[in-house]
Amino acid sequence: MSSSRKRRRRGFEYSPLRSQSFRLLELISGRSLYADIQCRLRDYQFDSAPPYEALSYTWGDDENECRISMNGLPSYVRPNLLGALRHLRQPRSTRIIWIDAMCINQNSAEEKSVQVPLMGKIYTGAERVIVWLDEETFDSGMAIDFIPHLTVVARVDVETVWLSLLSQDEFLRQMSSLIHLFSRPWWKRTWVIQEVALAKDVVVLCGSRHIPWSTIHFFIMAWMDIKYAPHHWRSSRLQTTALRTLGMLISGFSEALARQRLALRTNSLAPESFELSNLLWSFKYRSVTNPRDKIYGLLGLLNDHGVQVDYSKSSEDIYVSFFCSCLLEDGGLDWFRWMTGECREPKKLNLPSWVPDFGPRVMYPISSFLLNPVRGELQRAFLAAGPDRSRSLFTIQFEDDCRTLVLRGRSFDVVSQCGRIFPLVDDIVLAGRPTEPILSHWKKMVMDTPLEPYHSRIAREDAFWRTVLTDRQIEGLHFKENAGWNPAQRLPSRAKYTPPKNAEEERELLQAMENRGLCLNGRRFCITRKGHFCLLPPTASEGDLICVLLGGEVPYVLRCIDNQGQNFYTMVGECYVHGIMDGEVVTGALEGQDIYDIFRLR
């Protein structure tokens, strides 16, 4: 059998790409929507490529792949992409477009490792990016028509208008259609962030309907400014779901829009707002098919990241290597904010306890920055490991092929009593879980504890509430000289404090904490053997060690594991311990009066 006949039986096969080249797809014209799809792939150097568009879409399930013709040979694509090709095909002219699944040989780890780092350049060079949301549904047209109207309403932002609209069945049906549209998988993908942020022009396609990205942009910006709606949208499960869905949309794409503003040299308050660590944190809720793409999918947003893309390595090796590099380059433990608590699901990768899987965290990190009103600059909220000069003493070692992390620090205390876990915001708002019984349980723990190290009932009560609030201000409640709530605004150490006087004030305080997503949510109040009050991760248990690690902003909870007579530890997470958040534990060590403890983390 001739080689050409063998090739035709096998179907289309990719030829190797030359250096600094990429492929473009020629989508052959067709008059019928359901006519067979015919395409050609051609290689181009970047400086000689014709004008082209780029597709942003979701891959979807790999079952029931559909046959198309590629360079005259059979090839197969997933159903979602087939739908996109049918609607993108023009009746009389060939369309030139870049599509990752077709223009990159997905079976070649070597080619993917070369082409993926070029995707930022590819999307930047496209004349237009086309977002494919999948086929139309019964209410997708209603949602598309409703977006401009809701944008106008959001800009009005009058309380009486919202109250009137929320009582209308038609408005709620339109909101429901919008929920369906924005709940489609495309909005949750990691890759779409750079695909939209880097584009010259974007159009959103849903079946035969389309909407300019500028309309989406104006809707997002108007929605971000709404003041009244969120308060009233708690009145029913539907309205809460609508608020949360649109909130997720805004939080994701506002970051992409901010990237565009940054490109125009608009100042940003947040320090290093577009370092990879910040992007990973901002987009932790985004989904990927390949775990490697949690990291690789954001590289196009960065000018300089130092990450070597290599799809031949396992996801575990990539995560460990990447996190080790981050710790070394940081010169501290800022990256440990990923140890904020459990993911929504257990780790799916076989990673050391100190290496995150960069999945969604359900708790707000304790470590953060605050604005110094005197200097007008951002500074760390806590200094548990002492002043910044302690970073000069920070050392880090890796053992066992980077599976063991060796750090220095000081042991502080052992967890003695663990309270019930405070529910997450989701459970409070959506499931209606009560919080008062948990607070009462915690308060009973406090009252049953000896006064040491808090020498009076008032001091003990003050310490309890400061622990519950992680020493942060809440607007208009109990703290005098309050300039407004900020998740990173600590209480002045000498601020006069008035604890809740009755059950009603306690309920108000709890509602304020629930609404603002403070560090309390998802954590548990605990007491150490020495009587210190602390707020720990939900997985903390009696017998866990609380320590301060050099280079860290906050204390950490570790769990000792015995390995052939040697003590190793697993990372449980960061914590707040009242009375040791400003370097009290390591003061002597920093002055050379004491030695450090060594912690080997696995």
Image: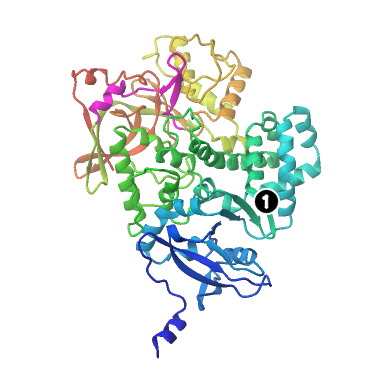
Residue for point 42% across, 36% down:
340
Residue 473 visible: yes
Q: Answer whether residue 385 is magenta in the image.
A: yes
Quadrant the C terminus occupies: top left
Between 354 and 442, the one nearer to me in the picture: 354
Quadrant the N terminus occupies: bottom left
Specify start and end residues of the magenta stretch as a single range.
Answer: 365-394
Asked if 591 appears above or below 101 in the picture, the reply is above
Q: Is residue 154 left or right of residue 250?
A: right
Image color mode: rainbow
- Find residue 386 and report its horizontal and vertical position in percent: 30, 21
Instruction: Choose top left, top right, bottom left or bottom right for residue 235.
Output: top right
Name the outermost residue toward the front: 48
Name the outermost residue toward the bottom: 1
Between 142 and 484, the one nearer to me in the picture: 142
Residue for point 67% across, 47% down:
179
Look at the numbered disc 1 and give the secondary structure of its residue: strand
Q: Is residue 316 left or right of residue 469?
A: left
Please, what is the three-letter code of the amino acid marked with disc 1? Ile
Q: Is residue 276 left or right of residue 179?
A: left
- Find residue 327 and report its horizontal and vertical position in percent: 31, 38
Residue for point 44% across, 11% down:
459
The residue to which callout 1 is attached is 211
Asked if 142 appears above or below 247 in the picture, the reply is below
Q: Answer whether residue 512 is magenta in the image.
A: no
Q: Residues within 10 Å of mark 1 (few under 14, many from 20)?
A: some
Residue for point 30% across, 47% down:
321
